[in-house]
Amino acid sequence: MDSQQQTLVIWIIDDGKPGHRNQSLGLAEAIVRQHGAIIETIVLPKEGGFFSRMRALHQQGKKLTKPGLIIGAGHRTHIPLIYLAHQMGARSLVLMRPSLPCAWFDHCLIPEHDFAEGRLIPANVILTKGALNRVTYDPSIKDGSGLFLIGGESKEFEFDGETLASAIGEIVTHYPDTKWSITDSRRTPEGFLDSLKDVQMSAFPHQQTDADWLPAHLSSAIMVWVTEDSVSMIYEALSSGAQVGLLPMPRKSEAGRVARGVKGLIEEGLLCGYEAWQASHEMSQGEAAFAEAEHCAAAVIKDLD
């Protein structure tokens, strides 16, 4: 983008899924910090046929400033992303590996674990470590607190509430001067937080938190423990610059490509497994340099200029 042109306008196509919206905002907000930009949101219609939904998108767009970049995350955004980019003369950017050919988009931000070792990476692909997010590192707001992030049963993991509760109790006991908070997710079995009422910490059920709660608490925490199934929260915790540990979850299938990515983070010393912590009571050091949204924003801006 020419430096003499007006401020970059970014459209985000929102498919209604918080995780996808979080990734898109993470990148867009990083571009704002580095380059300056205006962020607008296009809400993807849930009802109607293909052509009626495209018309609805076009009508929304007519009310907004013409964009230079349009971002989409999630399968349902792929065709609307290409359509709007063509209609508006804007660059298209897709987050996560698309269901359509990468060549159909101007930019593709794809986790590195989605590409087999040795496979040729297309020129328009930027590899990322996991999913992007809105969490940023700011040492000035670290308040010495700790945070537990609890997921639930998934394709790869079972949920063993008794073992998990025991691990949480042991961690809290070992760090008695830390002010602990805990939150769960939609996949957490009902009643799990209630089973921890005797543990000295503040519980925040996910139903009582908004979109800004987690980024704020992660940014202030110096230590975060995440259940191993919660991959997106693992990367959010790492982005906060906190020391990050993995809570035990029984595996019910062989490790997939995402889990292999997490294993790589352990090998790099960015994550600490619960059993390793039990043996040494030492955590891996916080990694302020883990800022994938900033890294990707810089690469996108370079291509726009």
Image (spheres, grey):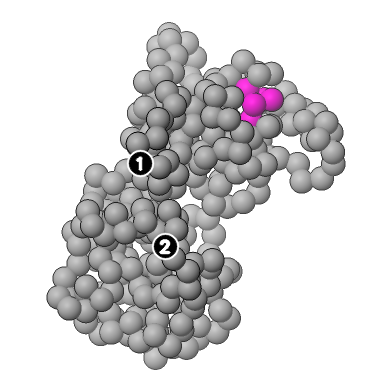
User: In the rendering, at what x and y percent does residue 166 appear?
Assistant: 35, 87
- Number of the label disc, if any, that sits on residue 255: 2
2 or 1: tag closer to the N-terminus: 1
Q: Tell me the number on the disc at residue 287.
A: none
Place of residue 285 in the rendered image (x, y in percent of width and height, measured from the top left): 18, 59
Residue with the most extreme front position = 118
Report helix, strand or loop for mark 1. loop
* Residue at image mark 1: 117
At horizontal 42% and vertical 23% (from top left) the residue drawn is 123
Region in magenta: 81-85
Q: Is residue 81 left or right of residue 213?
A: right
In the foreground, 297 or 38: 297
Residue 84 magenta-drawn?
yes
Amino acid, disc 1: Glu
The answer to whether any part of residue 111 appears in the image is no
User: Circle 2: is it few (<14), some (14-19), or many (20+) Cα within 10 Å?
Assistant: some
Q: For this rendering, which residue is in front, 163 or 21?
A: 163
Q: Residue at x 37, y 27 (%)?
A: 299
Residue at the image point whose x is 36% and y is 75% from the top: 248
Residue 277: quarter of image: bottom left
Q: Amino acid at mark 2?
A: Ala
Q: Is residue 76 left or right of residue 122?
A: right
Quarter holding the N terminus is: top left
Q: Secondary structure at mark 2?
A: loop
